[in-house]
Amino acid sequence: MINVIGLGYIGLPTALMMAAHGVEVVGTDYNKQLVDTLNAGHTTFKEEGLDELFQNALDAGVQFTTEYQKTDVYIVSVPTPYDKESKKIDPCYVISAIKEIISICPKGATIIIESTVSPGTIDKQVRPVIEAEGLVIGEDVFLAHAPERIIPGNMIYELLHNNRTLGVDNAEVGEKVKELYASFCQGEIVITDIRTAEMTKVVENTFRAVNIAFANELARICRSDDMDVYEIIRICNMHPRVNILQPGPGVGGHCISVDPWFLVGDYPEYTNVIRKSMETNDTQPRFVLDRIEEIMKENDIKDCLRVGLYGMTYKENVDDYRESPTLQLLVAQKDHEVHPIKCYDPYLSADIIPNQYHDFDEFLKDIDMVVIMVKHDEIKKEWAKLEGKVILDCHNICPLPGTYHL
């Protein structure tokens, strides 16, 4: 039996995927309300294909509880926040899970950490906790690191098809863990050492963050001197060895906006490019706010209450709003001491902030200016409803004439 610890955006799909492919799985989470929701037969977030996978897993016997199980294999998939001052990872949730596991696990159990951690976290933080209890790693318990590599909006496909990296202490454990993931993973499964596995996951997200920052910086340069950043990128990308990304309103989620800071926190003397890139991305929502104010003045819109942000999630067609550019923008707006801007997102049914709408038509009725923060499929079908509005398009997707851009 596999005990999956943490049933959030990564742990739940992983538990369901394994169960649906014949692995006996019990999912554990400290959040009783979440566990009760799952036991009542309902998923806890929206994701294409998740409900079908959930039903398949239920049919296969997956269970959910707040209790840790005594078993041979554990998968730890809990959050890993970072300290915003030091930029270092805060492994408290991982450490808490490890302590719970080693208090009940049988001799020879394997603990697989899926949570993203900074390079060296397992050596510096996890191993000492286990050894402090008098356990010998490699005899009493075995450690592995299997960083997740999926994206909200396409989780199910990517769980099945993406390549995986497994970090282990010895080849025998590696083959055992590989066999477990091969129960569903159709991609290549690479076995390496634990620290390398830690580093590759953080580097992958850092690469993406740096490239996003370059596009965002280009947008600022072009805005400062009245150039069309989208036309410039289009032409540059005709070069066979150039592939510049598109600028946007910022970076959200719990990967690209967080993981690169782990490297900055641990290696401050070597991460000048990464630090500056992260600062660019983190300040992009404020750049959008400045742009909103410019356009308001140009169109004689005097009240922020007449401005609406379309989209509150961190990317299109998902309900995940962690670290979203919209929420970052609203935090920045507080410094301006003006009324909060109105917001609407078709994927968020709960009230997240004040001035949040749940009906698109009502949202549009109460505003003069629309800021497209997220390129949900919904708005691409409703351009006619935006006619007559002042539009700031942060993604260059709106076909209406007179649309403003970053």
Image (cartoon, grey):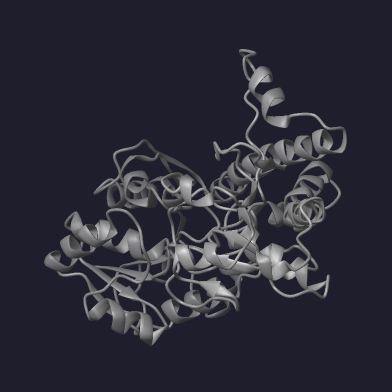
Name the quarter where the C terminus is drawn: top right
Q: Give the percent coordinates (x, y) of residue 46.
A: 36, 63
Q: Give the percent coordinates (x, y) of residue 311.
A: 54, 59
| Pick the front one: 313 or 252 | 313
Residue in the image at 53% along x and 80% along y: 133
| Pick the front one: 265 or 253 | 253
Q: Give the percent coordinates (x, y) of residue 358.
A: 45, 70
Q: Quadrant of residue 107?
A: bottom left
Q: Is residue 242 visible?
A: no
Residue in the image at 65% along x and 13% along y: 239
Left or right of 109 on screen, residue 146: right
Left or right of 241 on screen, residue 61: left
Q: Give the percent coordinates (x, y) of residue 182.
A: 28, 45
Left or right of 256 on screen, residue 139: left
- Where is 174 relative to 365, above or below? above
Q: Quadrant of residue 66?
A: bottom left
Left or right of 318 on screen, residue 401: right
Q: Is residue 373 visible?
A: yes
- Where is 205 relative to 45, above or below? above
Name the quarter where the N terminus is drawn: bottom left
